[in-house]
Image: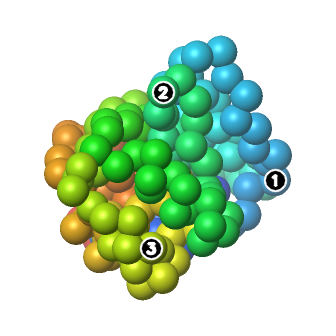
Amino acid sequence: MNDAPELILASTSPYRQELLARLGLKFRALAPRFEETHEHNGDPAALALELARGKAMSVAEDFSNAILIGCDQVVWFEGRVLGKPGSKERAFEELLALRGRTHEFYMGLFLYHTEKKAAQEFMVKGSAKLRADLSDNELARYVEIDNPIDCAGSAKTEGVGLMLFDRLDCEDWTAIVGLPIIALTTGLRNWGYPLFQ
């Protein structure tokens, strides 16, 4: 199908690129020209969708026939957004605060078809609880092993971080990693995109 729209992932995240690559679909990953803000009005789902939309639409003018993929995850704990910790010290502090407690995450997915001038939005929600019996030393060791400074919530579920959790609840585990593949492929099928190439 030569006239199939190009797939553009508006993200530099290696986790999202790896998930999308597993599907065997040809795509390009581009850095979105979008300044993220985590200001919110207490609605983490709306924030996640707003960020996803901003990423995708920031490159929309560059393509005449493409499906743009924008996504963002908001980790929500006690009425605030947990961003990427940025340092091992901050990651350790976040894990101490999360130990034995439940936090939620909201994955917003925004698809935009530049030729059709059409959009689709998806929201995948989940929750997680860290084990209550994790010692300070175990958390410190985890941070040294996985270096989760680029992960909201300070835990890499695709690595040894899985051992931190007492429970992970989500309808699509790929959303936890960073790109909800079930929602994405649903959206692509809605536009007749050939998945099995």
The disc at residue 90 is none
Residue 177 visible in this rendered orientation of the protein: yes
User: What's the residue type where badge 1 is placed?
Assistant: Arg
The picture places residue 56, in percent across and down from the top left corner, at 65, 45
Look at mark 1 in the image and give the residue it sits on. 33
Could you tell me which secondary element the residue under label 1 belongs to? Answer: loop
**Which one is nearer the viewer's eye here, 135 or 78?**
135
Which residue appears at 27% of the width and 61% of the height?
Answer: 134
Give the numbered dot on residue 140.
Answer: 3
Q: CA distance from mark 3 to mark 1?
A: 35 Å
> Where, quadrant-wise, is the C terminus in this rendering?
bottom left
Disc 3 packing (10 Å; few <14; some 14–19; many ≥20)? some
The residue at the point 70 percent across, 35 percent down is 38
Residue 111 seen in this snapshot: no
Q: Which image quarter holds the N terminus? A: bottom left
Is 78 situated above or below 154? above
Question: In the image, residue 145 lies at what x, y percent?
Answer: 42, 84
Q: Nearer the viewer, mark 2 or mark 1?
A: 2
Of the pair 178 and 155, the residue shown nearer to us: 155
